[in-house]
Amino acid sequence: MNKENTTNEFFTDWKYAAAPEGTEHIKLNKQYDLFINGKFVKPNSKKYYTTINPATEEKLAEVADANEKDVDLAVNAAKNAYDKVWKKMPAKERSKYIFRIARLMQERAREFTVIESMNGGKPIRESRDVDVPLAANHFFYYAGWADKLDYAFPNKKPQSLGVAGQIIPWNFPLLMAAWKIAPALATGNTVVLKPAETTPLTALKLAELIRDSGLPDGVVNIVTGFGKTGAAIVNHPKVNKVAFTGSTDVGKLIQKSIAGTNKKATLELGGKAANIIFDDAPIDQAVEGIVNGIFFNQGHVCCAGSRLFVQENVADIVISKLKQRLETLIVGNPLDKNTDIGAINSKEQLQKINEFIKIGIDEGAEMYQSSCSIPSKGFFCKPTLFLHTSQSHRIVQEEIFGPVLAIQTFRTIEEVIEKANNIPYGLSAGVWTDKGSKIFNLTSKLRAGVIWANTYNKFDPSSPFGGYKESGFGREGGLHGLMPYLSF
Ligand code: NAP
Ligand code: MG
């Protein structure tokens, strides 16, 4: 048989040759201490925990588990650096340090990229093309603002706040650190940052980079640990501002614990975005946008397009193209440059996703999964669609934070706006249509902080990001992202 002339059989047999990124150049310590006052110091707790590679379940390093005393040392180092050095430094000098951090990050981009994929499970293509360049760009962008605050907020006399306590999740470990640290430094604040328990390694590499940059001691402190370490930062009396990205549940706890204090806060919480496809949309691009919206970073994206609304008269074609596309997605080794969907970040998260898949089936929705195989070791999940879902389904209302898409159809604009908004969250949305007027109509009526039109999951340091309702408050990025770190 002439294989070249057959179609399906040939293409389904055909596989990309593996193209794994090397890890020989990566130097990881066996054990990481806390970065306090410009040095790595042993934790008072004397405790360490193991951080793993979620794609192989292999141990990568031991990481310090900071207790309240450790957090106290870090906050005092930040306060001291604020009072004695950072607050007094001319803004244009602060700017040079931030710029230097950005340059060093670019120089070490490959190292950060590989570690991000090893510790977080995300495909190397994403850490290489999205996370690391965007993280560096945030430092570049905010370096530019540091000496222009009076122009950003004319006649308002912006003042720094003091010590910023910053707590970040595991889905964009380095990028979230950059989102938090860059504007804090540009506005003259000092920092205590806690990465998520499962993804501490790029934050610790960033600590090494910050030490090498010559940033004055104590301006940035990085403490690793679990939820209680985060709580100790939030509750510390010398912390003036809390910047949190994570789940809505923890966001609510934080809001309770700072009530009655004069701490400022920004909370970037969960989401359940509507991705809306009208019948006049460019269908092939929209299908790519749906795939990018929910399968990018394994669906570990608070703004993921996890609810799909397709106009009824194009639903069949969109869904059939989507199923075909699902079959071509490559699930597996995050370090392979061909991989589209990497590892789920942790065993717990995989369990949560699998529970939701079961809930979806039990609720009566029709499940469709790619027929791909997944590695036997590590935490992986096949890209999953749910058809015939309705507003009352839990898989439509609750955040799954995995590669699971709930699909509904609609007939009219009014119907889709109502359905899209009928949810506790309001972080982001996507609209696919040929008509500018429809886009403007929807952007004014959808209750979501970020709305993409004919694209999805695009980020830029100059555009603000943040939510409505239970997705939190405050904005990060852009000029807006400076405000939460200033008093006027
Ligand atoms: P999480 O459990 O809320 O954790 C976020 C961070 O807070 C982690 O560093 C965590 O430490 C820490 N933490 C846990 N309990 C705490 C407490 N009581 N006080 C202070 N800090 C505490 O969320 P996650 O499971 O890591 O991340 C997934 C969630 O984050 C999703 O719901 C997602 O939507 C949301 N998210 C939102 C955005 C956004 O921009 N809006 C971005 C990314 C993620 P541990 O790691 O030890 O738990
Ligand atoms: Mg957690």
Image (cartoon, rainbow, N blue to C red):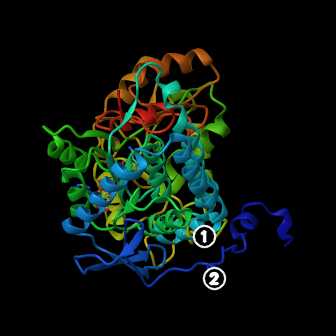
Query: Which numbered circle lies on residue 292?
Result: none
Helix, strand or loop at mark 2: loop
Question: Could you say where residue 359 lies in the image, as x and y percent from the top left?
Answer: 29, 54
Question: Any atom of ligand 1 within 8 Å of the CB at mark 1?
Answer: no
Residue located at (29% from left, 42% from top): 393
Question: Could you say where residue 460 lies in the image, as x and y percent from the top left?
Answer: 58, 40
Residue 85: in sight, yes or no?
A: yes
Question: Could you say where residue 404 lies in the image, as x and y percent from the top left?
Answer: 43, 52
Quadrant of the image containing the N terminus: bottom right
Q: Quadrant of residue 472?
A: top left
What is the three-letter code of the residue carrying label 1? Glu
Q: On the image, numbered disc 2 is attached to which residue? A: 24
Residue located at (66% from left, 66% from top): 337
Residue 368: in sight, yes or no?
A: no
Classed neighbour count for the residue bearing mark 2: other residues with Cα under 10 Å, few (<14), some (14–19), many (≥20): few
- Distance between mark 2 and mark 1 Cα atoms: 10 Å
Question: Could you say where residue 246 lies in the image, as x and y percent from the top left?
Answer: 33, 50
Q: Earlier in the sequence, mark 2 or mark 1?
A: 2
Q: On the image, numbered disc 1 is attached to which residue? A: 111
Task: Report whether 423 appears left or right of 114.
Answer: left
Task: Report whether 17 appears left or right of 131.
Answer: right
Q: Quadrant of residue 255?
A: top left
What is the three-letter code of the residue carrying label 2? Glu
Question: Which residue occupies the foreground of this view, 442 or 120?
Answer: 120
Question: Any atom of ligand 1 within 8 Å of the CB at mark 2?
Answer: no
Q: Quadrant of residue 449?
A: top left
Task: Report whether 435 appears left or right of 235.
Answer: right
Helix, strand or loop at mark 1: helix
Quadrant of the image containing the C terminus: top left
